[in-house]
Each structure stands twice: as structure tokens, then as C-alpha cells.
Image: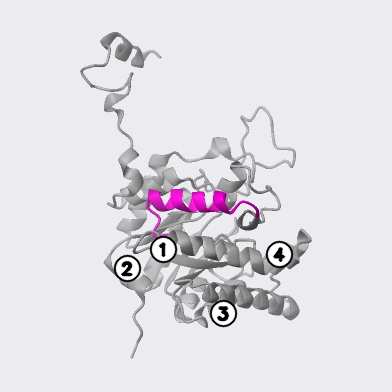
Amino acid sequence: MTQPNPLTERLDAGPVICAEGFLFELEKRGYLSAGEFVPEVALEFPDALRSLHVDFQRAGSDIVEAFTYNGHREKMRIIGKEDLLEPLNRSALQIARSVADAKPGNFMAGNISNSNIWDPENADRQAEVRAMFTEMVGWAVDEGADLIIGETFYFAGEAIAAAEIAKDSGLPVVLTLAPMAFQQMADGVGIVETAQKLEQLGVDVVGLNCFRGPATMLPWLKAIRAAVSCHVGALPIPYRTTQDEPTFFNLSDPHAAVHSPHGRTFPTALDPLQTNRYEIGSFAKEAYDLGINYIGVCCGATPMHIREVAEAVGLTTDASRFSENMKNHFMYGDNERLADNVVALGSTA
């Protein structure tokens, strides 16, 4: 008898919202270093991580994703803290579990992601990556994860390896790709072809996350949605990528008075290139209308963006109590108590 799949049951019934983007937001809040982007916050400032999870949860995220992105063995070796690998992973998973448990119906997800060492021509490297994924998925299972999210894969081979290992857990699996500026995976495999292969492996949700903003992600989502029968995931970055600059790695800002010392807007000088909240809401509604029910926002996401996604697909969240209400704004409103002479300044201010 086929075991029930709570994730796909929820997705069959309607939208499921997933907040990602912990790296950027926690860096902005002063809890990790840009460039390294290692989630030591799970050990050093667990209350800060818990607070962000709660903020995303209040904004409408149905999935509390353990912040183990970049929390793999190779990254910990780079910063000389490999001994902290397992404690970091378990702490992040336990924090996510506790937040998810506080709201009935929430899922807690274990997370694996791009290793940045995958080499299509090097079997030893591939084995090393598989070992890293295996131990991280094992810790996620130990700590009671409800599903496994594999994300931000730009090599098809690595995505497939992640899918195989995640599926071995017996848990539902979400696997999202992150194509770079070249319009295929980094090992030359087609984006849609990779999504189809993941579906064949039994992945429950395939799709795209990160790297691309709404304008350059949506065309690929349409192609994937048409090519697979499983659920599709859509988690863009909230930045204005274009056909000429399709990812946030290559976004330019010619109007900047002071440029970043490393010469690129990514990752620390992207602020002027953000979408507004309404653009994110429009993306979410368009994706939802395509039949995409797994929707969120990745790097650059704030709780405001997640609330916008949730409300765009017809959901009311705990944070909706504080959604936009301009009728009482001192310059834009129509409340009878507002001073007419001040409201009149709105057109000239």
C-alpha cells in the first residue's frame, strides 16, 4: 500500500508557501559574514535564527526550513571549523523543529544544497559530495524532519545525486534548480530535461530557486510546468534580473556613487536593484495561475515578501493584520480626521 504523502496532499489542496533566503537576511542583521555565508548563527545566536523563522512563519511560510545551507563538510573545512559540523546541523534542525511544532500544520524541512565542489569529470569529488549529502540527510531524519529540501543546484549531476540520497530517506522531497546565466545546467544538460529526470526519480516537487528574479525565472517555470506532471516549485530572488543580466551574479548598477570593493553588485551591493513587494506578489499570482502551488522567495527575502506571496494566492496570514492600510496615512488617506491642507501636500511633496 502506498504511504500517504502529507506534502503532496497539501499541495493538491492548494498553495504551500516556503520562505528561503536566510543567508542574506541574517547577514543584514549582523549574524554572519558575507562572502563566507556560513550558518554559524545556529550555534552562536540561536535566538536570532529562531526569531527569523518565527517572522517568516507569521508572514505565511508553511515550511520551516532548517538553516543548514552551506552547513556542509567542505564549507566548514574552508573556515577551519569542521568539528562544528554535526552540532551546527543538529542545532539548526532542532530550532526549526521547535518553531514548526508551535504552529499546527507547519512542516519542518531538512536542507541540502549546492556543494560548490561538484565536478562532472571527477568521480572522487562526486563521491565526496554524496557523502556530505548522506550525513546531512541522516541528521535531518534523526531530528524529525517532515521533508527534505534540496536547493540551488546548478549542475544536473549534483541535483540528481541529491535527489537520490534525499529519496532514500523515505521522506517527501523538494528539489529545485538554479541555472546560471547560460541557459542550461553547468554540465551542459537542459534545464527542463533535468527537471524531468528528477520527476522520474520520484521527487515530489521540482522547480527553480535563487539566482534569478521573477522576469528571468518565469519563462523557465512555464517550460517546466508544461513538461512535468508532479508539483512545481517557484522561489525567485527579489531582484530585477533581465534578459541581458539574467542572474544576480551579473546585475550591474551604473548609478551607484560607491561601488563594492570586490567589483560586483553581488552579493553586498544589490540593494538598489530589488523588486518592490508588488512585483513579487504579481510573480506569485502568475506562477499560481500556471498551476504552481509551491511558492516562496529565496535570497533577499524578508517576511514582507513572504506575506506578499501568501496574500497574492489568496491566503490570510498572522502578519496580514499589519498589511498595507493607506486610508489612515497622513498624506494619502481618506479618514475624515486627516487635515485637508496636509493631505493636499501629497501631490507636491
* Left/right of residue 164 with respect to residue 223 in the rendered view: right
Pointer 1 and pointer 3: residues touching (CB < 8 Å)? Answer: no
Which residue occupies the foreground of this view, 26 or 313? 26
Disc 4 on helix, strand or loop? helix
Q: Amino acid at mark 1?
A: Asp
Q: Amino acid at mark 4?
A: Leu
Disc 2 on helix, strand or loop? helix
* Left/right of residue 42 with respect to residue 191 in the rendered view: right
First of labels 1, 3 by sequence position = 1
* Left/right of residue 127 with respect to residue 162 in the rendered view: right
Q: Nearer the viewer, mark 4 or mark 2?
A: 4
The residue drawn where x is 66% and y is 56% is 40
The Cα atoms of the two marked residues, 3 and 2, are separated by: 23 Å
Residue 207 point in image, percent of width and height: 46, 65
Q: Which residue is mark 2?
A: 10
The Cα atoms of the two marked residues, 3 and 4, are separated by: 23 Å
Pointer 3 and pointer 4: residues touching (CB < 8 Å)? Answer: no
* Chain part drawn in magenta: 44-63
Answer whether residue 246 is visible to the viewer in this image: no
Magenta stretch, main secondary structure, is helix
Q: Which residue is mark 3?
A: 165
Residue 103 point in image, percent of width and height: 37, 59
Pointer 4 and pointer 2: residues touching (CB < 8 Å)? Answer: no
Answer whether residue 163 is visible to the viewer in this image: yes
The residue drawn where x is 71% and y is 63% is 75
Which residue occupies the foreground of this view, 175 or 74? 74
Q: Nearer the viewer, mark 1 or mark 3?
A: 1
Quadrant where the N terminus sits is bottom left
Q: Quadrant of residue 222?
A: bottom left
Q: Which residue is mark 1?
A: 101
Q: Nearer the viewer, mark 3 or mark 4?
A: 4
Q: Amino acid at mark 2?
A: Arg
